[in-house]
Image (tube, rainbow, N blue to C red):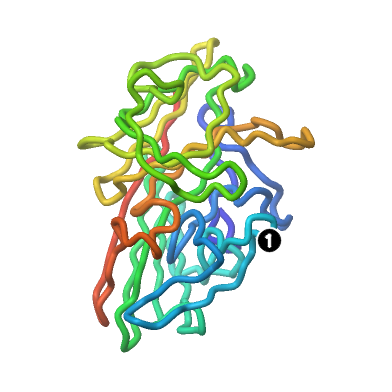
Amino acid sequence: MTAHGAALRELQHNGRDLVVPFDLGAPIPDYRGIIAAPWPNRIADGAYNWNGVIQHLPLNEADRGTALHGLVFDVLWEVDAHGVDALTMRCTVEASKGYPTSLELVVNYRLASDGLHCSVTATNTGAATAPYGVCPHPYLIAGDFPMDDWMLSFPATSYLAVTPDRLLPLDLHAVEGHAFDYRTSRVIGATQIDHAFTGLGTAPQLLLSDPAGTHVGMSWDEGCPWLQIHTADKADGSAHRLGLAVEPMTCPPDAFNSGTDVVVLEPGATHSVRWRIFGG
């Protein structure tokens, strides 16, 4: 782990990487392993209407004109407690021009025999009601074969179509008969994905398998009814398809504008979600 972004920097099983790592003390590439809060994914133009007030967030995705992955991915979290197999960190989101109240965020990582367990808890410490969402951002690695050869399965029944230029949401479509239907495990191949999925059912789980017999998986609680999948395609070839970004989300892209599944945090209210990464 690293205090920068409360990011999962490295995770191994039997000496094999389960997530795409990055060097200690180096800048975090491609948001690897960060906690995205108080919203996941992107907000169009960094603007949204909350309780009749137009909020304006900093635009950190300049080419698409969006506010991406929240306010805490590039801050130092404070280590609250640590042990051999557990770590707790916290940070504060201050009320600002773009966000209406202050939050306290606490992330807990715990290593067990069945994988790495993580939880994120947000508490509204301010005086105003706040919109909220969260997701992790690991890039999973199934094994030594290229991503095109990995087998992928997850139970989504629908995917969210997006605009080709800014990746902003359009409408939901059934995965039935589409290249994005991974309800039954099959090879990823050359398919490029950077979309949100829903209709995940109860006790959702994603499994990614390598032809050599190794695998990595992720499960999460029902507080995350959305799942962003990104095959990490890079036009310049750098870090091209090194790992599959798997992001269980409490709400879809641009949720502060659509209102879809936004968590409304009243002053003093608390919200928690959990997920797990496992390998074999």
Residue at 77 percent of width and 33 percent of height: 237
Q: Quadrant of the C terminus?
A: top left
Query: Can you give x and y, in whole percent of width and height, for residue 144 in the image?
Result: 63, 20
Residue sitting nearer the eye, 15 or 139? 139
Residue sitting nearer the eye, 87 or 211? 211
Residue at 35 percent of width and 70 percent of height: 131
Looking at the rendered structure, the kind of residue marked 1 is Ala
Does 57 sit above or below residue 95?
Answer: above
Mark yes or no: residue 114 visible.
no
Residue sitting nearer the eye, 172 or 278? 172
Residue at 57 percent of width and 32 percent of height: 231
Q: Which residue is mark 1?
A: 62
Does 26 sit above or below residue 246?
Answer: below
Query: Can you give x and y, in whole percent of width and height, for residue 273 in the image?
Result: 31, 55
Q: How many marks?
A: 1
The answer to whether 236 appears left or right of 240 in the picture is: right
